[in-house]
Image: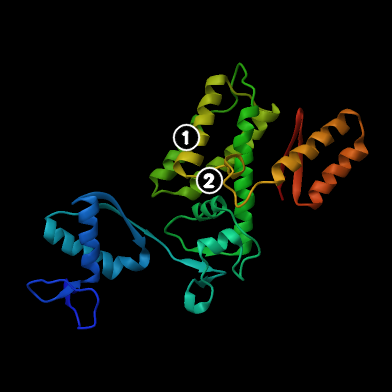
Amino acid sequence: FALWKKASPEHIMRWPSPWSDGFPGWHMECSAMSTRYLGERFDIHGGGMDLMFPHHECEIAQSTAALGHDSARYWVHNNMITINGQKMGKSLGNFITLEELFTGSHKLLAQAYSPMTIRFFVLQAHYRSTLDFSNEALQAAEKGLDRLMKGIEALARIKPAATSTVDPSELEKRCRTAMDDDLSSPMVISALFDWVRIINQLADGAQTITAPDLETLTATVRRYAFDILGLKDEKAAGTAAGRDYVTPLVEMLLAERLQARAAKDWAASDRIRDGLAAAGIRVKDRKDGSDWELE
């Protein structure tokens, strides 16, 4: 493979060298940039699986020959993105940009999707697996993210008890094992979802947990959901696409419904619940109030 290419007269990239006025080969560019900006040794070199050969193998060969040792400690290659089962490409007319995802402006999109929905969707597949974009999959990710954030919110409603019927170290062990297994984000999400169910049971009083265990559980959930997976509660942080008008309106309606239930006005209570259900919002009653989630 070429380390240096002679520039034709019309070529805009050209530098003087002992071999010609020219420019570095494609593989040499990356070796030069990584050494210049990351040093002779760095931790992670990423790229798509289609770059493994010849690009990265050539890069390894020339960097090792030049430096006398390996440059990157780990090579991480992600798989391809498809759209409804078809490879994404501009020539096929199915190429979607992030801006189009956030605004819903692409013809293949049924709606806009928030940045965190896209991130959560990507994390649901292992980085070495093919990732297929579809409206159905994105909408499922939107609902899944909402469910996870609701579970994290429910941690604040849990009242500590004298004994624990759950062991939060089990969650830490599952998540750590998953991340040690080639960054298996889908398994981390699976563990978090299993514990969302347990968290809801704790919030409803069906299970108990001591104050120290609750502190451990809260720290573990937040560390893996927020710090490691990089998710954010868009409603709380105000980072969703546009202002969140839904949450305060739903909370106001649920407050009205709570008053109706207290007054035993079951017709009004059911009317509010059914109206929210018709709008795609499911109400879940608790002993001391109600939760809601997107259908």
Do labels 1 and 2 touch, CB within 8 Å?
A: no
Residue at the image point whose x is 70% and y is 42% from the top: 247
Dot 2: what SS? helix
Residue at the image point whose x is 21% and y is 61% from the top: 31
Residue at the image point whose x is 57% and y is 46% from the top: 239
Q: For mark 2, what is the residue?
A: 189
Of the 4 image quadrants, the one containing the N terminus is bottom left
Residue at the image point whose x is 64% and y is 44% from the top: 147
Q: Which mark is residue 4?
A: none
Can residue 171 be seen? no
CA–CA distance in space, label 1 to label 2: 12 Å
Query: In the displayed structure, does residue 93 sit left or right of residue 245?
Result: left
The percent coordinates of residue 196 (x first, y second) are: 61, 38
Q: For mark 1, what is the residue?
A: 172
Instruction: Place residue 194 in its image quadrant.
Output: top right
Can residue 252 be seen? yes
Q: Is 96 above or below relative to 145?
A: below
The percent coordinates of residue 295 (x first, y second) are: 72, 50
Query: In the displayed structure, does residue 46 sit left or right of residue 192?
Result: left
Sequence-wise, which precedes: disc 1 or disc 2?
1
Amino acid type, label 1: Glu
Q: Is 129 above or below relative to 217?
A: below
Amino acid type, label 2: Ile
Dot 1: what SS? helix
